[in-house]
């Protein structure tokens, strides 16, 4: 589990243009990032 101040592990995410972006690629383009993971979006109920 990550704690405040820990670096996020490297990962890939799909983009809306059917490409993939890695954390390293995103950090190379931007100084700071916020990723929001909304897990309830595709669940029932």
Image: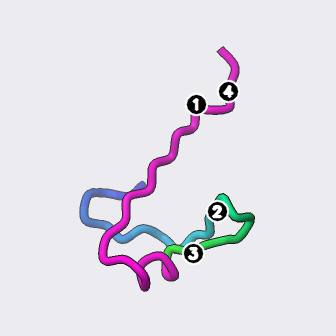
- The Cα–Cα distance between marks 4 and 2, rounded to whole angstroms, is 21 Å
Q: Nearer the viewer, residue 16 or 42?
A: 16
Find out whether the residues at labels 2 and 1 contact each other: C-beta distance under 8 Å: no
- Which marked residue is nearer to the observer: mark 4 or mark 2? 2
Q: Quadrant of residue 14?
A: bottom right
Q: Which residue is mark 3?
A: 22
Q: Residue 21, located in which quarter of the rendered image?
A: bottom right
Q: Nearer the viewer, mark 2 or mark 1?
A: 2
> Magenta segment range?
24-45
Tell me whether the residue at label 1 lies in contact with that at label 4, contact meaning CB atoms closer than 8 angstroms.
yes
Task: Count neighbours of disc 3 (C-alpha within 10 A) and say few if under 14, some if 14 to 19, many if 20 or more.
Answer: few
Q: Which mark is residue 6?
A: none
39 within the magenta span: yes
Which numbered disc flags the more N-terminal residue, 2 or 1?
2
Which callout, 4 or 2, points at the residue further toward the start of the chain? 2
Q: Which residue is mark 4?
A: 43
User: Which residue is rendered at x = 64% and y = 62% of the image?
Assistant: 15
Q: Is residue 28 above or below residue 45?
A: below
């Amino acid at each position: 589990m990550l704690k405040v101040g820990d670096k996020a592990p490297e990962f890939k995410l799909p983009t809306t243009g059917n490409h993939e972006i890695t954390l390293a690629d995103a950090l190379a383009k931007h100084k700071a990032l916020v990723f929001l993971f909304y897990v309830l979006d595709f669940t029932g109920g």
